[in-house]
Image (cartoon, rainbow, N blue to C red):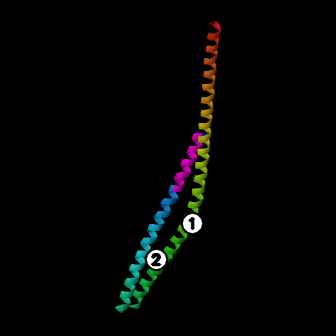
Amino acid sequence: MLRLKQSIEKQEELALQKVLVEISQVQHRMEALTADILHARQLLEQAMREMLPAVLVESMTNRIEGAMDRKQELSHALAELSRQREIQLRKYQAARNNCQMLHDMQARQQDAHAREREHAEQKFLDEIFAARAQRS
């Protein structure tokens, strides 16, 4: 039973790690998009100062808006992943607590069994000692 609970705990831990990796990946994509948006805005400002054609400026503006939309989508995905992380963390903690409880129960049972065995051995030695004392 303990092995099963340990297996479940490991599965929950792996699922939690997977969510954490996904969160990290989304955060990196958001940081990259932020840098791209900043760079694109700088280019747009430069294009406006240089009086480039309106079509080019509009194209750059559309590209910036598209990047901002993708960043917003990633922000929503990050919020969902954070929610999943909290849920998965609770599942992992429950599995870990359950496993720890069984481990503790097993340790107490082994201690109780060892004490019983020691008591039986001591009783046996006492009986041998008492039998020898009666013969003498």
Residue at 57% over, 53% down: 92
Nearest to the observer: residue 120 or residue 48: 120
Q: Return the disc, 2 or 1, that comes first in the chain's sequence.
A: 2
Residue at mark 1: 80
Q: Is residue 90 above or below residue 47?
A: above
Q: CA distance from mark 2 to mark 1?
A: 20 Å
Mark 2–mark 1 contact, CB under 8 Å? Answer: no
**Residue 118 rendering spot, x and y as whole percentages:** 60, 25
**Residue 85 rendering spot, x and y as whole percentages:** 56, 60
Local secondary structure at mark 2? helix
Residue projecting furthest to the left = 50
Q: Is residue 135 magenta?
A: no
Q: Is residue 15 above or below residue 105?
A: below
Quadrant hosting residue 91: bottom right
Residue at 44% over, 80% down: 64
Local secondary structure at mark 1? helix
| Quadrant occupied by the C terminus | top right
Residue at mark 2: 67
Quadrant hosting residue 109: top right
Q: Alpha-carbon neighbours of circle 1 within 10 Å: few (<14), some, or many (≥20)?
A: few
Nearest to the observer: residue 16 or residue 49: 16
Residue at 50% over, 60% down: 20
| Quadrant occupied by the N terminus | top right
Q: Is residue 9 magenta?
A: yes
Three-letter amino acid code of the residue under disc 2:
Ala
Q: Is residue 90 above or below residue 38?
A: above
**Residue 73 rendering spot, x and y as whole percentages:** 52, 72
Main SS of the magenta part reads: helix
Residue at 42% over, 71% down: 32
Residue 17, numbered circle: none
Write down the region rendered in magenta: 2-16
